Amino acid sequence: MYTQDLFTVVKDHVKPKVLKRMNRYNKWEYGYNEEYDIVVISKTGRIGEIYKIQNLYIGLPEVPKDVVKFKNNKWNRETLPVAFKKIKTIFDWEEYPVDFKEKWYDYIDKEFTRREQGFWFYNKSVATYLTGTHYMYLQWSKIDVGKPDFREANRLFFIFWEACKADIRCYGMCYLKNRRSGFSFMASGEVVNLATINSDSRYGILSKSGADAKTMFTDKVVPISVNYPFFFKPIQDGMDRPKTELAYRVPASKFTRRKLIANETAADLEGLDTTIDWKNTGDNAYDGEKLKLLVHDESGKWERPNNILNNWRVTKTTLRLGSRIIGKCMMGSTSNALDKGGDNFKKLYYDSDVTERNANGQTRSGLYSLFIPMEWNYEGYIDSYGVPVFDTPKKPAEDPHGVKIKQGVIEYWQNEVDGLKQDQDALNEFYRQFPRTEEHAFRDEAKSSLFNLTKIYEQIDYNGDVGKTKLVTRGDFYWENGIKDTRVLFAPKNNGKFYLSWVPDVSQQNKIIIKRGIKYPANEHMGAFGCDSYDISGTVDGRGSNGSLHGLTKFSMENAPANHFFLEYIARPQTAEMFFEDVLMACIFYGMPILAENNKPRLLYHFKRRGYRGFAMNRPDKLKLSITEREIGGIPNSSEDIKQAHAAAIESYIEDFVGLKQNGTYGDIYFQRTLNDWSKFNINNRTKHDASISSGLAIMACNKNKYRPIPTITRKTYDLGFKRYNNKGTMSKIIE
């Protein structure tokens, strides 16, 4: 049974008494409410349900009394009144008598209200809210198949987009999507919607190529504009169907309700001076411009020499004046393979996480990320009410065109995946086009990986499919009673830095052997740690690489899983000392040694000062150690031999213990971050792969005998003082 987690309706995010009081006095203002950490998209002063979408809390309008109920209890597009069929422009309207126009003022006013405040209708007897933008898209936009269908996925998309527009901290959205989700048409509908109601504004379009941007403009934007009803459509300057620029200039008019009611003539109306255009793809596209809205289509497919990250750094400045955000970006795409533009888009997407903000309250990119899994928006598996058919129904459902839906989209998708498992690159392409997880969306090509990407992805998929990640507990270690060098305990925490999939029995925890005043791990026979440390607490950019720690078991007779990665730590605490203490506590809790890089020696010195030099392993590949190596232990990372041995260790582990094994079972490494880091590991640029460094060192630590050099035996000749004789012939002779 499928359980959706795309959004949740949050109860008591605002106390009921507060909500009731604020609603009574219409106190909720459109925009971000810092006090309650909520983005209000209601323009009535009252809010109802609060949605949580991608960790963003969004306050919807309160359900009104006049909810529209269409025929068949679902969305129906209303037809333009017959009286308006021949009215194409404001000039046509002005030619009609006053009494005719007065009959239609209420109708036009109602449409303007819906455009501004949104629209409520009953969908399967449930009061359902559409934002004004979504209403304009469904009711008045023309797409390639004629009129758009109502889809619940698109409703959530537009709610999130409205929140992006309302939030003064936000530059827009970075939308990770599946193929054929309708983003290009929805974005085209929005650019026309905004451009036809705002004056002195500019709207821009970019895509993976100039030709694609032009196609979006001519085939999507222009037809939507042309087919708007006259009361929403300013008169444009130039051709009806332009190729480069759609200009709402004089004699174009900002056609508002006030002006309709005032019955002003066309000659008296002011021009919008608003344009929509497109540009060729390039890092400096729209540089120096001021934009109200930038539509960024196919952003995950910018290939060299174009770079979406460089372009966003430039175009971001077109959306602000000083610190004030004056425009928004609507960015959406599937992802290419990582070396074909996908890697840059991936970084931009994760830099748009709303849970990670700077001191100004903005994400690193300024955008808000949104991912809608394919099962929400896959053609052929959406019923007539716009709701996805996730599970195979007991009784066939119907799509909007009356076609029977006998199978659930999850089952269909899995069948497609199963049919492609023998062709990993084809499978990865399918994942990128129709992802169910963010990891699917950013799958790379198998041939581009140093390691066996097929086995890595098999393990990632297995972990996700069977919910093995639920076997991982998150938390932190701490000293009992806060007293250092006593017992280490573990506390589960939702925001903890450690991820654990196994802990030893209580009798095996905190086991230490003391020799000559030095503490040694008592469980070295069970496993070991590998660590990629850092020495400097702060960095110039405030980020820096993470500290990374991995724990791995050996084969042993103890009650422990064999060859099992049981601990993952990838974090950068406020100070390096906090990281050192975290690592030390983990080693003590498990009673296992650690192999760490000694080119960043502060961690190893921390161990020595505290009396735990015996926990720090010496490099296994060398018998004669340097003075520093004898003092603190560790292994250098500069040697080419070490780099090769390290990569070979990970490669060997993946072949033996990751993904589908020869006996038909799957591996038991449940740390998705580590698996993803292995998938893109670059031996020539290891600095970005903290998880790969530490996990590889853990493997080497558990198999140290493989790297121990064979001592050379030198044979020496000794003179014992005895003469040697040649006994040939009748007389013996001394051999000189």
Image (cartoon, rainbow, N blue to C red):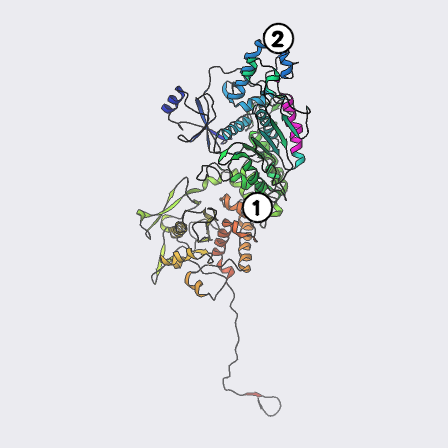
Question: Who comes first in sequence, dot 1 or dot 2?
Answer: 2
Mark 1 residue type: Lys
Q: Position of residue 319 (x, y in %)?
A: 54, 34
Report which quarter residue 497 is drawn in: top left
**Left or right of residue 388, residue 506 in this image:** left
Q: Do the residues labelled 1 and 2 touch (CB within 8 Å)?
A: no
Q: Please check the rendered image and state whether residue 639 is part of the magenta-colored stretch, yes or no.
A: no
Residue at image position (61%, 47%) is 448
Q: What residue is pinned by disc 2? A: 97
- First to last magenta residue range: 213-230
Residue 40 on image: x %, y %: 46, 27
**According to the image, label 1 marks what residue?**
455
The residue type indicated by label 2 comes to Pro
Q: Quadrant of the C terminus?
A: bottom right
Q: Which numbered tag is attached to residue 713? A: none
| Foreground residue among 172 and 160 | 172
Q: Is residue 616 visible?
A: yes
**The magenta stretch spans residue 225:** yes
Q: Is the magenta stretch mostly helix, strand or loop?
A: helix
Please identify, in this view, whether the residue under mark 1 or under mark 2 is nearer the observer.
2
